[in-house]
Each structure stands twice: as structure tokens, then as C-alpha cells.
Image (cartoon, rainbow, N blue to C red):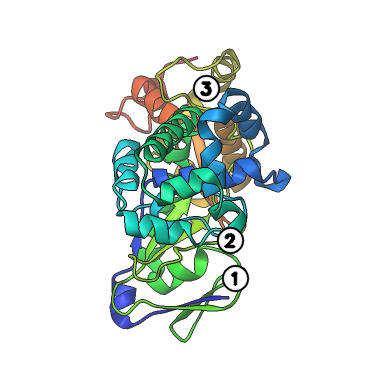
Amino acid sequence: MLRIHFTDADYAAVGLCDHPDVMWESLLSLHALQQPDASAGFGRWRTEVARELDPVAVGGLFSLAPPVGYSPDFLTPAGTKGFEQGLERVLATPARRMARELGRLHPARASAPYVRSLAAAESKALRLLRDALHHYYTTALAPYWSHIRQSVGAESAMRLRVREELGVRELLRGIHPAVRLQEDVLQVPYPGPDRDVHLRGRGLLLIPSFFCRKRPICLHDQKLPPVLVYPFEREADWRTPTRADGSLPTRAQLAALTALLGHTRTRVLAEIGSGCTTGELARRLRISAAAASEHTTALRRAGLVSTVRSGRTARHALTVLGADLLHQRHRPSHPHNPSATAET
């Protein structure tokens, strides 16, 4: 069990990341790639990435990021904005810290020649790490980044609304079904021996992660800024990537869009906007909850809407594709007038 101890100052300093942390997603997707889990919904992604990934170029990463157990904290530096900055901070890790954290790996991994060279801060090993991380990001994450960003953004928006309406304690209780908040101690199921983390006024940054699986995780070193990275429910059909290179939608997506949009669903798309629940959507359009759910399901299958769930509540938000389509088709001067919307 991981026990995180809060003071009043810590509650006030709880933060919520509103975008995917690229270095955490790199690390956790490496875990997912090495440990097949049918229930996690990464099967198609894993197949596509394995086909494109150069095993020689990224081989060293698998020594640093085992699917189970400790991975060095320096691989996930705090507060990075974008992959290039994250990569710079990883490579700028002080040699003493890098050696110390690499020494915490399982002995069989810590004794591997590449890991020993990296622990010795050899320039060739650092270049290999740079090239490996870059190749991995461009192959395994960049083609899917638009969807990852949208999904994390929708999750964060829903949690922010929980905090605004119900308070920070309810936000903490709701991030995972197994998490409990009792007497100012957040209890998180965790492997290994029990751990106590005393925040002491530093607060806690919550980071929703697309590739985090099963349970929340944190950094090993308690002297680092406290974070709790947690998984959230993803859509089962996320695996059709939204390309970050600006390429056109696939033929299947175009066919789905052509068959999908008309007056009613364009209104649904417009009402969802930056986010709403199924019940709110039904009230705004004066339709049944079942009908609202049917429309959002169809929009989600076409890649226009993403959905995150907390208990019985489903909150919907537009994807990048959905927002782009809405801006082209919907006239904001007549937000509720079906005649202002073009026919498919």
C-alpha cells in the first residue's frame, strides 16, 4: 500500500495536469509494449508499433524500462513541455544521479554492458539513449498523439469539474476505484512493501496517463516533486490513430462521416462543444438519455467525440477531428438553428 499524507496546505496545492506528459507516456507505453494485456486495449497499437520499431535502435530502452518493477526516475523529468524538452532534460541528468538510479535496477539489468556504460556517463551510451528515445517517440507515440492528447484533455476536464463542484477531496477519491482517502491519508494499492509519502506542504500533481494501466504509480525518490500518475478509462476503438502529420482521414473514417452527419447529429456535435455529460446533452436537446447516448456512440465511432467515465457518469468532449469539422460546418451565430447547418 502507498500512503500519501496530506496537510491543509497540501490539499490547496493539489494540481491536475491538463495534457499528456510525453515522458511518462513514453515510459508507460514501453511497459505496455513489453507486457501484453488483452484487457488494456493496446493490441492493435502493439502490433503496429512492433512492425515499425527498429529493435536494434531501441534495445537499450527495454533494459531501462522493464514491464514490471523499478524504472529510473530520471526518465520522467518534471514539468516538460513537449518531447524535445523532455529529451534534453533526460540527457542533462547529473551523472551521479543517473548512476545511483541505474543501480536500483534488478542486478541482471544493472549489470548489462549498455546500462553500465550509461551509469559511467559514457558519451556513446548517452547518444544511444538519445537516438533510442527519439526513434521510439516518433514510431510509437507521434502517430497517435492527437488522440492521446484529446483523451487526456477530456479526462482532465472532467476531473477539474469534479474539483470545482465537489472539492479536492472528491477529486482525489475519484481518480481510481481502489483509491481511498481516510483521515487525510490517500491510500493507493501498490506492489511491494508499504510506503509512506509525507507531502509536507508540497502538494501533489495528478497526471492522467493514457498508457498507465491497472493502478496509479509515483516516483521512487521522495525528494522529487510529488506526482501521482493514474490510468483512466479509454475508448475501445481508440486504436485507429489520428495522425499527427496532418494526413487525411482514412477511407473508413470518411465513409463513416459521410453516413453520419445530418441536422440532429450536427446539433449534438455543437452542443457537446468543450464537454458535457449524457444527461446534460439530453436536456439541452430535449431528447431522451437513450437517444443522447445513441448519438454520442455514433459520433465516437467516427472519431469525432471522446468519452471518459466516472462511476455512472459519462462525459463527452470533441476530438481534434470533431472540433475541426464543427468549425467548418456549424455557424456560431445560429447555434440552435438546424437550418444553419449544411446537409451531408
In the picture, the disc for residue 215 is 2
Residue for badge 1 = 189
Residue 154 has which mark? none
Q: CA distance from mark 1 to mark 3?
A: 44 Å
Q: Position of residue 59 (x, y in %)?
A: 55, 36
Q: Nearer the viewer, mark 1 or mark 3?
A: 1
Would residue 29 be seen by someone viewing this image from the given angle? Answer: no
Number of residues whose C-alpha sits closer than 10 Å to that of mark 3, classed few (under 14), some (14–19) or many (20 or more): some
- Whole-percent x and y of residue 136? 48, 33
Q: Earlier in the sequence, mark 2 or mark 3?
A: 2
Q: Which mark is residue 261?
A: 3
Q: CA distance from mark 1 to mark 2?
A: 7 Å
Q: Earlier in the sequence, mark 1 or mark 2?
A: 1
Nearer the camera: disc 2 or disc 3: 2
Front-lying residue, 337 or 252: 252
Tell me the kind of residue under disc 3.
Leu
Q: Position of residue 12 (x, y in %)?
A: 29, 73
* Left or right of 158, for residue 65: right
Mark 1: amino acid: Pro
Q: Front-most of 47 and 279?
A: 47
Residues at circles 1 and 3 in contact by the CB criterion of under 8 Å: no
Q: Residue at x 55, y 31 (%)?
A: 299
**Image check: 307 left or right of 18?**
right
Q: Earlier in the sequence, mark 1 or mark 3?
A: 1
Amino acid at the residue labelled 2? Arg
Secondary structure state at the residue bearing disc 1: loop
Query: Quarter of the image holding residue 86?
Result: top left
Residue 204, horizontal then vertical, whole percent: 36, 68
Q: CA distance from mark 2 to mark 3?
A: 38 Å
Query: What crowding class fits label 1: few (fewer than 14 Cα within 10 Å), some (14-19), or many (20 or more)?
Result: some
